[in-house]
Image (spheres, grey):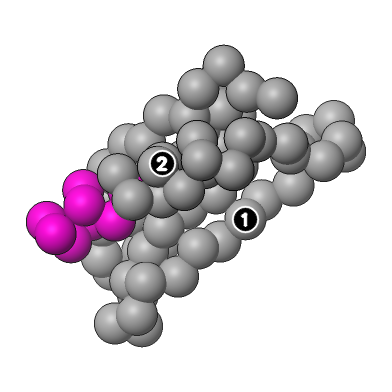
Amino acid sequence: MTDGIQTELTSPPDREKLVVQLMSGCEQFAELNQERDLLEVEIYPRRDGQPWVFIYSDLIEALERAKEKLTGR
């Protein structure tokens, strides 16, 4: 479970466009980007090898916030 999902608009040096990092605590679990002019979600493994578990509605809400930060809509 999660104590909340944070979204942060960033400009990583390895990307041409802005991205939104999705964080659980201090660990990034995904990134929303539009490098290929489509919204893409990259999902990263947990450091401890365990699966990420989120409440469905919390994850959907976080993805919507990320989309709004990235696209303005």
Q: Hey, which residue is sitting farthest left in the picture? A: 72
Distance Cα–Cα, label 2 vs label 1: 14 Å
Kind of residue at disc 1 = Ile
Measured as percent of width and height from the top left, residue 41 is found at 50, 63
Q: Is residue 55 left or right of residue 14?
A: right
Please identify the quarter of the rendering in which residue 51 is found.
Answer: top right
Q: Residue furthest right?
A: 49
Q: Which mark is residue 17?
A: none
Magenta highlight: main SS: helix
Extreme residue toward the front, this view: 57
Residue 6 horizontal side relative to residue 54, left or right: left
Q: Quadrant of residue 28?
A: top right
The crowd level at tag 1 (other Cα within 10 Å; few <14, some 14-19, many 20+) is: few
Q: Which residue is mark 1?
A: 43
Residue at image mark 2: 62
Q: Position of residue 57 (x, y in %)?
A: 51, 40
Q: Earlier in the sequence, mark 2 or mark 1?
A: 1
Magenta residues, start to end = 66-73
Instruction: Report helix, strand or loop for mark 2.
Output: helix
